[in-house]
Amino acid sequence: MDPSIALLLPEILLDIAACLTCKDRVCCLRVCKAWHQSFLPIIWKDVRVRTIGSIHHPYPVTMKRHCQYVVHLSMGYSRLLNYVVVFPKLQKLSVHVDFARQEVPESDLKKMVLRNPSLARLDFNGRDSSLGASFWSALLMVPGLRSLSLTDGCLRGNEAILAFWELCAKLTSLHLVGTQFRQEDHHWLATCSAPRQIRVLKLERIKGLTGVEQLALLSQCPHLQELNWHLSNMDKDAVFQLFAQKVASGQWPGLERIDCPSKAGHFGAVSGQMQDDDAAKILKSLRHLTVLSLALSKFGLVAFQALRRHFGTLRELVVRGCSSVTSIMLDEILCSCPRLELLEGGVLRASDAVESDQWRCLALKVLVVHFAFEDTEQDLQRLVFERLSKLTRLEKLHVGTNRDPRESYPNGLDFRLSSGLGALAKLKWMTRISFVGTWQKMGFKDVQWMVSTWKDLAVYGTLNQDPAICSALKDIVIHKEGATITKDQKKA
């Protein structure tokens, strides 16, 4: 059999398409009829409608001709009327309001939604626009709708709010970001439909609901598996305590992904942090934990001891900005979590990193820690690089500090070949390195090695403390064909 026949198999063409840009995929349409038939559904699967001048792309007529291939569709609200057609395979619709507080005629969006019963997910970015009760009631008629994301939307009046929660009763995934609840009173809380089917819930910057009221809504989701909860109220301490008590009582037996970070305010002050004891109570009560994000919390020794029972299942851990997390804790995590793919922590002392057992987190893709060296420990640089070289799946490495990015500090990881940088040649998937806030002394050979080893690498930080040398090094990076871009003094 002719080996070239394999290039006509749809499965092989799918693998080829995954490695190509959109422009290259369009070129593949002209190869032959078989490639045209295989690449056409791939090109039209995910469509984003854009406006250049006064012309919509793709053209509405062209879209209608290929509507049977569209699975994901994204566009601005002002363009929606031109594309209200039946998309037989449409699963995800993303609509954003083009201007803040723009009047949103619900009829166009209702027509679009009701004509596509295959729709499973709706993402709406309202920019403070509001949708009434009739729209949310219309969504109830879409049989397959299971996921809703509402960003910067406004629910005005009890009627609209009740209709919204009636819809949520059939959803399994709900994301509310910057959503405003403008009710005449709070009686709707006692009468609204319970979102009992929700498995994935995100609440961030919610306005019009206190932390206690948000917790009351959480309590109506007994099947919750993933929670992303960003409280903006000042009563977070008490709310987190109540939340920990409910977890301990078995309110959410299937909960396995928790993202409840605190937020730094003006001048770096952090208010409403989850306490160490509350975090420990949660961790002791969970049966199976895969993701934990408690950035800027009071996570400390008590919570860490409770976390140990989840080391075998943990995939993502974010304890960045937690002042009680020690270097020894971070090293134990690296040595004990074989499934870990993301770790964001604080300072990891070089001596702890090289004197401990071998790291077991060989699945790690993202590592955010600051390697700290004493003045007498510079000989450990090469050993740290050798440790990092074992993480062959690593894609993003952030070894900067959480300090003021306008300043630089010595005694961090030294990205020079003379210090052992060459050991990282084993990391074939690297796409980002950040050393913002550290004191680097890279030379021309070091930079040339980096851009030749990792073709698509993005570098964050100052390459050399000498401004003249740094400027020359940036020219090497920026003018390298295939493009690595250096962004100075910006947080990765």
Image (cartoon, rainbow, N blue to C red):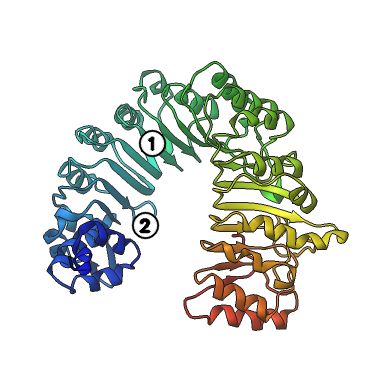
Tell me the mark number nearer the camera, choosing from 1 and 2.
1
Q: Position of residue 151 (x, y in %)?
A: 41, 45
Q: In this view, does 215 lie above or below 353?
A: above
Q: Which of 10 and 182 is in front in this view?
A: 10
- Compare marks 1 and 2 and give the one earlier in the sequence: 2
- What is the residue that sits farthest to the right in this orientation? 376
Residue extending furthest top? Answer: 249
* The furthest residue to the front: 1
In front: 173, or 158? 173
Location of the N terminus by quadrant is bottom left
Q: Where is residue 179 in the image (x, y as percent from the top left)?
A: 43, 40
Residue designated by label 2: 99
Question: Which is more toward the observer, 241 or 329?
Answer: 329
Residue 165 occupies quadrant: top left
* Amino acid type indicated by mark 1: Leu
**In this figure, which residue is indicated by the disc labeled 1?**
174
Q: Which amino acid does label 2 sit on?
A: Phe
